[in-house]
Every structure is written in structure tokens, then in C-alpha cells.
Amino acid sequence: MDYISTRGLSPAVDSAQAVLSGLAPDGGLYMPEAIPAFDWQRCLTLSAQQMSAEILKALLPDIPDMDTLVKNAYTGKFETEDLTPTVPVGDFQVLELFRGPTSAFKDVALSMLPQLLTAAKKEKGIAEEIRILTATSGDTGKAALVGFRDVPGVSICVFYPYGGVSQVQRAQMVTQEGSNVHVCAVEGNFDDAQTGVKNIFAACQGKRLPFLLSSANSINIGRLAPQIMYYFRSYADLLARKTIALGDKVDFSVPTGNFGDILAGYLAKRLGLPVGKLICASNANNVLTDFLTTGVYDRRRPLLKTTSPSMDILVSSNLERLLYLLSGDTALVAGLMKDLNEQGFYKVPDSLLAAIQAEFAAGYCDDARAENYIGKVYRDHGYLMDPHTACGWAVAERQKGENPMVVLSTASPYKFSTAVLTAIGGDTSGSEYDRMERLRALTGVPIPANLAALREKPERHTGVIPKEKMLEFVLGR
């Protein structure tokens, strides 16, 4: 299958090379030239692992033995064989994406990406080391570190914004073990770290290095494609409970930062799944809400620190893929990205905005409203959710129509215990670990084992660098 750059200035590659490269040489993102035909109804009858394998076979056909890769990625690593269960909570359904080894939705993709990358490397006969570069707003980093830990022939560098992740998210990264893992804080915000990673790719383009560069961010199609599975899994769960009949449309409210998670939902729809509206739920950094409402994407605003830090993003990279999918015009996309880089904003044509609004709705939720919904949902339904999920719930309530509504729950509440304790009226004194234990005692919700173990782990990666030193950090590992 041919993959092309969203900006149209790089040669087409096959799906294995797209995974290996991560980012296209022209700075664009790889997408299949055409969405393949897919038997979506049969897919709904399969187990979660089988669903994943069938979807990945369709989208990444040049990577062999996908059934084995999926088995290696997931078996014994998640709390449930369903991987991502959907549970009824009040009038909504909640898709729990935090049942993996780091208690965040990124586990679904980043358990799979190392398998895809090493298989693609073997398929292409590549002997050099692959160095993974990752910018994280909180959850991607730890999931990537766990996924790539001690994988032969691969090393990984993770950059996170200094002071811009929760204490638990930071602890997860800086305590990471492994001979091939490197973690560093960057002075600045997530957008600075993400731009820095893209600049490293650009600076190294065409140069002879002792390693090949790739990415574990969702700019890599190998990171994005595995996320499609859980939309199918959720729809199948609703079918099994007779909440819906086959063919009924389902709306999904998705807490959104870099636009990868919600784009996976749109790709599920393009593969045939009866998805209704995809609702883009932002926090107070509501650049996506403004864009989906007006057609103007404008990053020229201060980045606010919120209680949902994984959504503290002003440059949503995967939106570029949507612009390509709905316009089919690589020259237009390249021009819009040039405007964003040089001027800080762009405006899409009215026809493209109309096409986007036919598929997506949007809203945002500030910290105060998120706190209110955490408390309300816990009091009314006994269900504990983190601040990102609370944003998804709040926006879902405003956007609810006739279709059943699924809210994506992207992280364990224990990753943000201070905010959650505050919302339910608990005592927030003491250390982060004290607050986790107090939240458990108050609610009876178990602390995930991987988070409970953090207290005893030593910090191994404590460096902080200016963003201008990121390239030097990568080359010096």
C-alpha cells in the first residue's frame, strides 16, 4: 500500500517504511493514498486482539505476521482481555482506555508500536539502530518508555515540558529503568518540545548519522493506527448489551489535545464503523474548539496550565491529516502548515470547514467545570474519573443528541489525585502518594499497581535543558 505525505512533496513509500520514518521528509505526515475496503461487520464479531490485527493488516499490509505482533503486544499486559472495556455510567457509556501498563490510553498504541517498528525494520533489512524521539504532554512518554524498554536495536529519547505534567506523570518517566531509555525535561511547554522534535528531524534530514530517526508520537502512523481498534471494541460492547442494533450510529466525545485519538475515530468511520458525531472536547486551551467553530486555527495565545495537562497543547499535529483526508489537496495542506509555522494561524476554505463540521462537533471545559463534573458524576453514579475524562463528559452533556454517547476515559484518576480529591471533597495535604492513598481509602477504587509502586523507585532522569539543546541531547546519547 502506498503512503503519501500530507504535503505532497515527498516520494510515496510503503506502509512499513512509513512506520519506520515517522515523519515524511517534507515535514508532512504519512497517510494511505486510499482508505482500503474493510469488512467492518465481521470485525465486530472478533476479540479485541483479533480486531486490532484485522485493522492493522488492512492499513499496514507491508508488515508481516500481524497476528503474532498483536499477541506479543497485548497478551498479559492489560487488566482485561477486552483491553478497553466500555461501561455504562448514567446516561452515557464510558470507554475505559486506562487498563494498560501505564494507566493511560496511550498504552493501546504504544504497546503495539515497538512490535510494528521492529518488524518493519526486519522487513526492510535495516541493521542500524533506530532512535525514537518523543515529545510528551504527560502520558505518551511513559507508555513509550515502557513499550521500547530494552528492545534490541532501538533507543528512545523522551522530552516533556518542565513543570507541565502532573507529579505522578513526571515520576513515571524519571524513574524509568532500561539501558536504552533517555528522558529529559525541556524549559517551555509541550508545543516547544513537539516543535523541537520536528526540528530535529528537519536538521538531520539527509545527514549521515549512526542511527535512523523515528517517532513514537502520533505523527507516526504506526502510533495512530492501533488506536482505531477501541472504537470498534466499544461499538461491539454496546451491541452485546443490546444498547444499540447493528448499523445504529454512536457518538463519541473525545478529550483532545494533539488530535490523534479523535482522528482514530474518524478513521474507524472511514473503515465503515457507524460513527455519528465525533465530539472534540478541549480544556481551557480551546484552540481546537475555535477552529472547528470558525475555520481559523490560531495558536497565537498563551498556553494555560490546567488540571488536564495532556491537553495543554496549542499545535495539534494530527489535524493536518484531517485537512488532507477531507480536502485531498496536498498543496492546500502544505500552504496551511506554512502559514501556521510562519504567521501562527491559518484559515481553511469555507467548503472544507463545512466538510469538517459535518463530521465533528466541539466544545471546551475549564478547570472549574471539570472539577464540578468529577464531583457530580462520583456523587450521582459512584464513578471516579480524571480531569481529562471530565472534560469529555462536560462537553458530551452539551452536545448530546439522539445517538448513544460514548465518553472516552483517557487516564486513571490516580494520575491526577490532587484534582480528583479536591473535586470530591477530600483532604489534599501531604505528598502525591499520600493523596493517592487517601483517594483509595475514600472511594474504594484500587490504585493501579504500576502507580502504587512509584513511591519506592529512585529518580534516574533528572536533566532539564533549554529547547535549543534538544538536538545536542539526542546526538549525545
Image (spheres, helix red, strand yellow):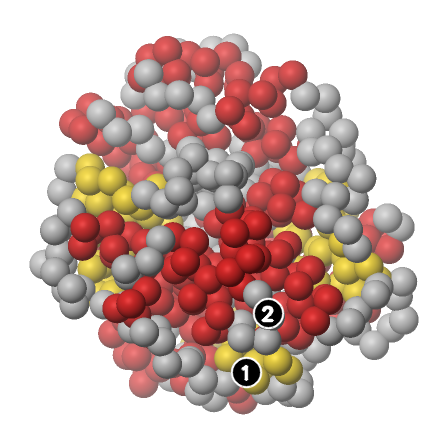
- Which image quarter: residue 65? bottom right
Residue identifier under label 1? 1
Q: What residue is shown at x 33% (from left), y 33% (from top)?
A: 385
- Residue 305 relative to residue 228: left or right: right
The image shows residue 17, relative to residue 448, as above or below, that is below
Q: Position of residue 27 (x, y in %)?
A: 65, 74
Residue identifier under label 2? 64
Under circle 1, the secondary element is: loop
Q: Nearer the viewer, mark 1 or mark 2?
A: 2
- Residue 191 relative to residue 381: left or right: right
| Mark 1 or 2, nearer chain start | 1
The reply to whether residue 242 is in sight is: yes
Badge 2 local density, few (<14 within 10 Å), some, or many (20+)? some
The reply to whether residue 288 is in sight is: no
The image shows residue 422, relative to residue 249, as above or below, that is above
Q: Dots 1 and 2: beta carbons under 8 Å?
A: no
